Amino acid sequence: MGSDLNSYSGNVVALIDLGTNSVRLMVVRLNPNRSYTIINQHKVMVRLGEGEFTRGLLQKEAMDRTVLVLKRFVEMALNLGAKELWAVATSATRDALNRQEFTDRVKNEASLELKVISGLEEARLIYLGVSSGFHLGDKTAMFLDIGGGSTETILGNQFEYFSLDSMKLGAVRLKNMFFPEEEEGPVPMERYDLLQQHVRNSALRSIQRIRDTESHLAIGSSGTIETLYEIARRNNVPGRVNHLEEGQEILSLQELGNTVKLLCSLPLQDLTKVSGMNPRRADIIIPGAAILHTLMEEIGLEEIHISRRNLRHGLLHDYLIRGKYGYLEAKPKISVREQSVLQLGRSCGFNETHGRHISRLAVQLFESARESALHSLGNEEGELLRYSAMLHDVGMFLSFVNHHAHTYYIIRNAELLGFYAREIAIMASTAFYHSRKYPRNKHPEFSGLDPESRETVKVLSMLLSIAESLDRSHHQLIREAWFSRHARRLVLNIMALEGYEIEIWALESQQTFFKRTFGESFEVKVEVLTQ
């Protein structure tokens, strides 16, 4: 991908996955020969979601212990030489009404920017992590991951996914719902039946979607599934699969059913002592088992392969594709982000030619404005502008009137894959102001952003607004546009075909807000091109 890998010899990156139940750290050294070495891994069960799912709020005690662990992880990563820290948060954080309070605490106390991802993005990262470490050949697989707050299902093959789904079903979530008080005794099968019925009702659409798609095998990941597999093996639970190839780990439906009977028959204090059980997982293993058991029954799975990989590995794989060191090539050639943006735009019937043209002009303006010292934003913000510009008119799908507001809503709620929640918010707000007045704090689309994001949106939306003016006719008459300085004067250079006058007139209305954004006005210089 054109990077000089030798200049990044020994670069270290830390990847952090904050789930509902546990937080995981992986520290990786990127080697100059396009390989990588995992130099440290840690997992701590913090129970961030404990008590949340019945109240909608992260509890103070849970936040306290999670922030402390994240602070220690950051210190550990820095001591190992990490130059970058990528941290994502899943179900417990994204569902919490007080998530901003929590992410602010993480930023202030642990010096960590926590990126909250959607359920579909979580599913995509799980797919990347599991599929990149499992040889599928030409087979199609159903991937299943049971977390503390959500369960993800994915259908895909070795190279691409066909569908992603995220359900609000998790071991901690169900424990909070069905075992609100600490219960020490065995779990009656009537209670277990209620758990299964809840799972059936909650997963009805996902089950139907999977049933309707042919797949050759099922692959399960997560601590819950691994623990159930270990318990079944170590306790010689009846129903073991006998056709194992060397190195394969498979849990049969019959084996799982017998394991459930064993677990439900024991009081909590005895559950902690079962061979293969992580004692800290004992109080949530039965809710987790109910999810796996029900899905296997309803989908018609006789067995499930066990994967020891998870979202953390997907985060690494995604970094290696998207990161600036070019270690892996994405398949297909366009990125997950661009695929997702195009999918959204095309599903809304957008004018792709116009969108691509505005995107190209906006990037030219962004890069030349940086060279002209109008802003100091980086390539990451430039990429967000590129995709905001591509999607700036998708709101026309609903109505021309207030289409900028419709565009904001569509981008904000589309769960674009490959983007973090903050990035989606910036893109949506940038697109919102492409045909509107200057961003103001009284606008909810702007006031909901953090201060740094607000400043970013001011710059990006101004440049997008200019780019939009330069194709007001939708005829792509303005072929190139860039800023430059001549004798201290800021000049907007334009290369255009005949008939460009409407675009130039449209620029006049931009001067007031441009000066408010950048502190100066610009002159326009046009060079007319022949056809």
Image (spheres, rainbow, N blue to C red):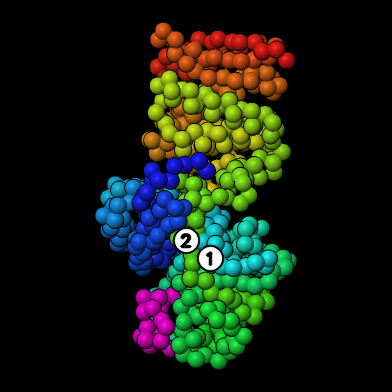
Does the magenta-highlighted stretch encompass residue 63?
A: no
Q: Residue at x 57, y 63 (%)?
A: 131
Q: Is residue 528 visible?
A: yes
Q: Residue at x 65, y 77 (%)?
A: 301
**Quarter of the image that includes the C terminus:** top right
Asked if disc 1 and disc 2 are in contact, CB closer than 8 Å, the reply is: yes
SS at circle 2: helix
Q: Which residues are magenta?
A: 264-285
Nearer to us in this view, 517 or 354: 354
Q: Which residue is mark 1?
A: 133
Mark number displayed over residue 1 = none
Mark number displayed over residue 313 = 2
Up/down of 316 relative to 520, above or below: below
Nearer to us in this view, 207 or 161: 161
Up/down of 469 relative to 443, above or below: above
Nearer to us in this view, 522 or 288: 522
Residue 471 is drawn in which quadrant?
Answer: top right
Does the magenta-highlighted stretch encompass residue 273?
A: yes
Residue most extreme to the top: 487
Measure how far apart labels 1 and 2 are at the Cα level: 9 Å
Q: Residue at x 69, y 31 (%)?
A: 353
- Camera-near label (1 vs 2) is 1
Q: Position of residue 473 (x, y in %)?
A: 69, 20
Q: Residues within 10 Å of mark 2 (few under 14, many from 20)?
A: many
Q: What is the number of callouts on the image?
A: 2
Q: Position of residue 438 (x, y in %)?
A: 48, 23
Q: Amino acid at mark 1?
A: Gly
Residue 22 is drawn in which quadrant?
Answer: bottom left
Q: Residues within 10 Å of mark 1 (few under 14, many from 20)?
A: some
Q: Position of residue 270 (x, y in %)?
A: 38, 88
Q: Amino acid at mark 2?
A: His
